[in-house]
Image: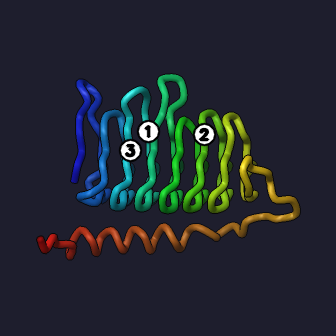
Amino acid sequence: MAVYALGDLVPDIAPDAWVHPDAVVIGRVTLGPGVSIWPTAVLRGDYGRIEVGAMSNIQDGSIIHCTESEPTVFGEHVIVGHNAHVEGATIGDGALISSGSVVLNGATIGAGAVVAAGCLVPPRFELPARRMAMGAPAKIREGYEVAEDFIAGNTQKYHENAMRYRAELRRLD
């Protein structure tokens, strides 16, 4: 795996977290227990800090960054879909940041909330718990509430898949 210190900034990775060999983790990044980071994801904690809570997963091609004044913090059991970009935002427990979405500085995504695929969450946007944001720019979908257990099974499946990859992945070239 490509894990780099940047001067005194050294990633802190839980022993049972898994980082794919083609992912990149740089600087002040904390990966909690059971976290998985998938191919070509980049977590770059150079200006500030990035924290990824237990059993969360950052999927293929996602970019996670931060600023000096705005860390990027993911709660537990968070899913970040393929090719998402999250920068300087706070993501609550059990939230889903769907594929291709962008969540920008100072945004807060509540526990169990969903950012729909391709959504652009602007700076300082607040998505309440168990609600859905859609569109560019994001708007809260009225009359819709995310089921309480919507995410839990998926984070367990990703954890199990990461443990399979840890045991069975082998490069053939």
Which quadrant of the figure contains the C terminus? bottom left
Residue that appears at 51% across and 57% down: 80
- Relative to 16, does residue 87 appear above or below in the rendering? above
Q: Are marks 3 and 1 in contact (CB under 8 Å)?
A: yes
Residue 98 in view here: yes
Residue tagged 1: 50
Q: Nearer the viewer, mark 2 or mark 1?
A: 2
Residue holding disc 3: 43
Q: Position of residue 123 (x, y in %)?
A: 67, 35
Quadrant containing the N terminus is bottom left
Callouts 3 and 2 close, C-beta under 8 Å: no
Q: Is residue 114 left or right of residue 140?
A: left
Q: Amino acid at mark 3?
A: Leu
Disc 1 marks a residue whose amino acid type is Ile
**Marks 3 and 1, the one that precedes in the sequence:** 3
Q: Secondary structure at mark 2?
A: loop
Residue 43 at x, y percent in the picture:
38, 44
- Expressed as whole percent of the image width and height from the top left, the position of residue 65 reads 45, 38
Mark toward the start of the polypeptide (3 vs 2): 3
Residue drawn where x is 68% and y is 40% of the image = 122
Residue 133 vs residue 108, the one in the foreground: 133
Q: From the viewer's perspective, is residue 25 above or below residue 71?
A: below
Q: Which mark is residue 104?
A: 2
